[in-house]
Amino acid sequence: MKSSAFLLVVLSLLVTIALLGCNETPSDSPHALSREPISVRGWVEDVDGATRNPIAEMEIARRQEQFAQTSVWVEGNQYASGGVSENGAFIVLDVPPPNATLGFQAPGADGAQLTLQNVPGTADVFIPALFLSKGKVRVGNPKAIQVRLPANIDKAKPTGAFAIIAGHKVPVMATPLREMMDRRDYPSPGGFRPVAIVR
């Protein structure tokens, strides 16, 4: 009787170990939750080739409808979270460093992709004024791209490292912690504000 109970305990332990081994994801896999995730923020300016309305209120309504149908994700990663707001601003958290591909889906811009390369862990990547098209993303103002790395310093300074964001070489800046408080907030797009919604 004791030997059969002992055998059951041993078998259950072996099954548990085997199941844990099957569910294990290698820590260097792009599908794993990173211990030093990066945040990616910015805004979608428009879809390339979209017909703009000359009446300001109608143009705002057109873009709001477009942004309501726009989504963002990280290719091959189930842990990243975020979205696109009604004014086109987007944020994606828990993006694995150093390399990742963001996908965007919008009316007239199927499978638009933006690549991030050599981004250090815990960095915040800011990419303003994106123009989406089928399979591609164009940055409207490449000089405004920022890659900030939190550091216990008083003043921002270059680290000497560079990241490649959407094909553009961007210096990685060591940034005081107090200036990184916005890294989990949606940015404010310039030049476009949604109209007030009266309920």
Image: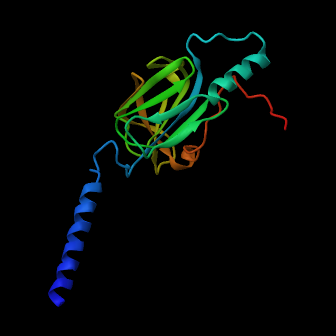
Query: Residue 21, how many percent across, how many down?
Result: 24, 59
Residue 115 quadrant: top left
Residue at image x 68%, y 25%? 65
Residue at image x 61%, y 32%? 89
In the displayed structure, 175 sits above or below 110; it is below
Residue at image x 19%, y 76%? 10
Query: Residue 58, how many percent across, how many down?
Result: 76, 17
Residue 19 quadrant: bottom left
Residue at image x 33%, y 42%? 30
On screen, residue 71 versus residue 189, left or right, reads: left
**Most extreme residue toward the bottom, as rendered?**
1
In the displayed structure, 51 sits above or below 130; it is above
**Most extreme residue toward the left, as rendered?**
3
Query: Residue 28, how many percent across, how many down?
Result: 28, 46
**Most extreme residue toward the front, as rendered?**
1
On screen, residue 1 versus residue 36, left or right, reads: left
In the displayed structure, 20 sits above or below 117; it is below
Quadrant location of the N terminus in the rendered image: bottom left
